[in-house]
Amino acid sequence: MSVHLRVGGPLSIPAMGPCFMCQREYRAVVAVGELIRNGGPGHERIEIPLYACGTCEGQLTLMIADALRSPVRPYARARS
């Protein structure tokens, strides 16, 4: 299985439903990605849309920004 996340953009149309991160029901949510199981011999391809509330969408945005940021202190090669 793989998870494809996208935060923001034109496909983020608000709806009412459960948030996949905080698991609260009946919230204003936006589509943020898909949970995908690739097809193969004996398996069919399945795509499950993932929806997040505004608070969790903000947390996802920060997590993505942290993952893309370079380290504060670059790694130095050890002396031999």
Image (cartoon, rainbow, N blue to C red):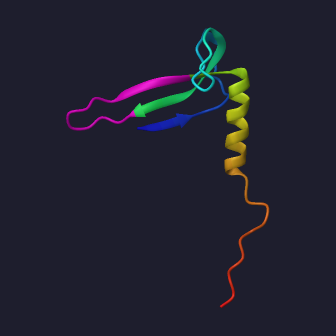
Residue at position x 54%, y 24% in the image: 50
Q: Is residue 48 a member of the stretch shown in magenta?
A: yes
Query: In the current view of this chain or complex, which residue is farthest to the left?
Result: 42
Residue 3 image position (x, y, % from top left)? 49, 36
Q: How many marks?
A: 0
Q: Is residue 65 left or right of residue 33?
A: right
Residue 58 image position (x, y, % from top left)? 73, 30
Q: Is residue 38 a member of the stretch shown in magenta?
A: yes
Residue at position x 26%, y 38% in the image: 40
Image quadrant for the C terminus? Answer: bottom right
Residue at position x 47%, y 31% in the image: 35
Query: In the current view of this chain or complex, which residue is farthest to the right?
Result: 72
Residue 62 image position (x, y, % from top left)? 73, 39
Image quadrant for the N terminus? Answer: top left
> Is residue 74 placed above or below 36 in the rendered structure?
below
Residue at position x 41%, y 26% in the image: 47
Q: Is residue 71 left or right of residue 12?
A: right
Query: In the current view of this chain or complex, which residue is farthest to the bottom?
Result: 80
> Is residue 28 placed above or below 59 in the rendered structure?
above
Point out the stretch of residues depicted in magenta: 37-50
Residue 34 image position (x, y, % from top left)? 50, 29
> Is residue 52 placed above or below 26 in the rendered structure?
below
- Quarter-of-image position of residue 75: bottom right
